[in-house]
Image (spheres, grey):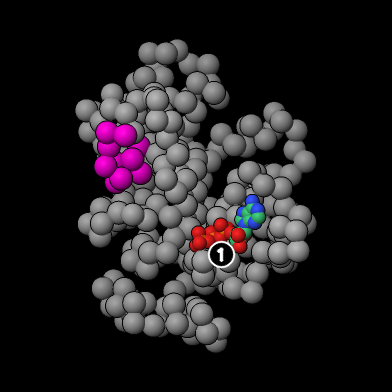
Amino acid sequence: MSELAIRVDGLETRFGSNVIHENLNLEVYRGEVMGIVGGSGTGKSVLLNTIVGLRQPNAGRIEVLGQGTAHADAKSRAALRRRWGVLFQDGALFSSLTVLQNIEVPLRFHTRISAALRRELAAVKLSLAGLSPDAGPKYPGELSGGMRKRAGLARALALDPDILFLDEPTAGLDPIGAAGFDELIKDLRASLGLTVVMVTHDLDSLYAVCDRVAVLVDRRVKVGTISELVNEPDPWIHEYFDGPRGRQAGQAHGAA
Ligand SMILES: Nc1ncnc2c1ncn2[C@@H]1O[C@H](COP(=O)(O)OP(=O)(O)OP(=O)(O)O)[C@@H](O)[C@H]1O
């Protein structure tokens, strides 16, 4: 796992005088699952949005799959965007489209394949995300929260991405639903060789799925495996992993 999928170099993010990231450096290797954690408002979602180009950095450079994301022309930006899929917090599905139609959106936008093939590919992604065929014709409003997440995941997989970005994928799911989603991410990584970057508050997900974790503290990230991070002197990191909830999650996953 030595080839880089993502390199964030000297990132600075500001909203007026509010500095969110300052000289933040992060490297994600191909094929790894990187968790991003941190206290509320530390800039996890903004970091994710900046990596996927929804926000321009105030300073610094971001490379995804060897290509700089800023200042690229529209054509190369679109080509790069095809190589990742994003699952936003609420699934971000179009409520007026059925699940299958939602999955077809990126295929419509980025490819010129026939409607019949599009429909067929969407059905494959539906199944890959662990949904049964009868979910396809349903509207997002008719689905449970867990099914909506899976539908959002199916859409994120539509273009066979190299990288999957997940923003709090298990938020709002019951523990069984969350564990099922973790398993799904693990399976997809193993079978498709995906690189996964996952913002989460869910300690169980961190233990179950992530190879390394980036913790946002003091406008930068501390990166390591959980067993490395447990020994960090920073009080937030220490409390997070070695506090009662962190220890419980570690024990449940055989880490302690
Ligand atoms: N468009 C914006 N304009 C001004 N400030 C913003 C904007 N978007 C985010 N922020 C600020 O940036 C900071 C980081 O926000 P972000 O949503 O990334 O936090 P987070 O770590 O994901 O938090 P949470 O865990 O609560 O979701 C917050 O202080 C937020 O108020």
Q: Main secondary structure of the magenta part?
A: helix
Nearest the viewer among 39 and 254 is: 39
Q: Quadrant of ligand 1?
A: bottom right
In the image, 166: left or right of 15?
Answer: left
Query: Would you say the beta carbon of the disc 1 residue lies within 8 angstroms of ligand 1?
Result: yes
Q: Residue at x 50, y 54 (%)?
A: 197
Q: Position of residue 211 (x, y in %)?
A: 44, 64
Q: Residues within 10 Å of mark 1 (few under 14, many from 20)?
A: few
Would you say residue 12 is visible in this rendering?
Answer: no
Residue 160 vertical placement versus 225 (above, below) = above
Quadrant of the rendered image containing residue 25: bottom right
Q: Residue at x 32, y 29 (%)?
A: 139
Q: Position of residue 38 (x, y in %)?
A: 52, 68
Report which residue position mark 1 lands on.
41
Start-end of magenta stretch: 141-151
Q: Position of residue 136 (x, y in %)?
A: 29, 27
In the image, 165: left or right of 71?
Answer: left
Residue 255 vertical placement versus 139 (above, below) = below
In the image, 164: left or right of 250?
Answer: right
Residue 192 magenta-highlighted: no
Q: Residue at x 56, y 64 (%)?
A: 41
Residue 183 vertical placement versus 201 (above, below) = above
Amino acid type of the residue tagged 1 in the rendering: Gly
Residue 34 vertical placement versus 236 (above, below) = above
Quadrant of the rendered image containing residue 76: top right
Would you say residue 69 is visible in this rendering?
Answer: yes
Nearest the viewer among 103 and 46 is: 46
SS under mark 1 = loop
Q: Residue at x 41, y 42 (%)?
A: 91
